Each structure stands twice: as structure tokens, then as C-alpha cells.
Image (cartoon, rainbow, N blue to C red):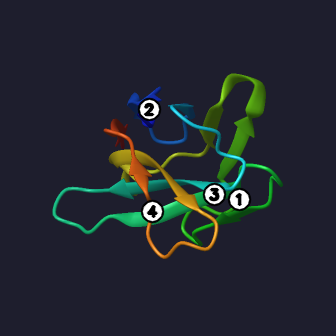
Amino acid sequence: QVQLVESGGGLVQAGGSLRLSCAASGRTFSSYVMGWFRQAPGKEREFVAKVFWSGGRDHYADSVKGRFTISREQAKNTVYLQMNSLKPEDTAVYYCAAIRIGSREYDFWGQGTQVTVSS
């Protein structure tokens, strides 16, 4: 059974940093793209960043480009989201997800971790 388990969320002041982790298990992810999404209260879920598990190519939403970095550590089956220069508008529940290359929708989702940025 595939599991994606996020951790590392919390409360931080504006300008601070957090690193989110997503521990993946239940299958090999070499043919997958790993993504981070977020959902703020009253808003739709939005894409944040993604990375190819095998190749390391990454892509970011414009709102986080230059501040967030996605990476993966294959030996630990873990994907990270390093978030720097956090802003109050980054406050949201952050979700880890996996999509098989060539698929249209993400196949697996984590339960989410709360990130709150105070001003």
C-alpha cells in the first residue's frame, strides 16, 4: 500500500524558514513525479513544486520561485520542500503527491501538514 507521509510543518514568523519532508513507501517511484501542493482556508488547492524522482528536474509555481526548493533523497525515499523567506500568504496545508509519468492526475496524496506564517 502506497503511503506518503508529510512532516515538518509548524508556526514560523515571516521571513523565516521551514523544511517539509514527505516519506514515500509502498512502491518504487522511479517512474513518478513528486509534487507539493497547498491549500489555504477558503481557497482551492494549488500547485507549489514538483520534481522527477529519477532525473531531478524541478518546476515551481511563480509565487514560490526563488524562495522554495524541492529535492529528493532516493536512499531515504523522501522528498523535501525547503521554504525560505516565508510570507503570511504561504500559510496553508501542504500536501505531498505522486503522479506516474504520463498520467493526467496525481495518483497518491499525503494527509497534509499545516504551515502557518505569522506577520
Callout 3, which amino acid?
Val
User: Where the N terminus falls, by quadrant?
Assistant: top left
* Residue 57 quadrant: bottom right
Question: Which residue is labeled 3 in the image?
Answer: 33
Please report the residue visible at 43 percent of the width from the left and 57 percent of the height from the top. Answer: 107
Which badge, 4 or 2, comes first in the chain's sequence?
A: 2
Query: Is label 4 in contact with label 2 (beta carbons under 8 Å)?
Result: no
Is the C-beta separation of discs 1 and 2 under 8 Å? no
Q: Is residue 6 left or right of residue 18?
A: left
Tag 1 residue: 66
Q: Which residue is mark 4?
A: 106
Q: CA distance from mark 4 to mark 2?
A: 16 Å
Label 4: how many Cα within 10 Å (few below 14, some 14–19, many 20+): some
Taking depth in this image into account, of 57 and 4 the one nearest to the observer is 4
Query: Which residue is label 2 attached to?
Result: 6
Q: Amino acid at mark 4?
A: Tyr
Helix, strand or loop at disc 1?
loop
Upstream in sequence: badge 4 or badge 3 = 3
* CA–CA distance in space, label 4 to label 1: 25 Å
Which structural element holds mark 4?
loop
Give percent across and percent down for residue 98. Answer: 52, 53
> What percent of the width, then of the height, locates residue 27?
57, 37
Measuring 61% from the left and 74% from the top, which residue is drawn there?
102
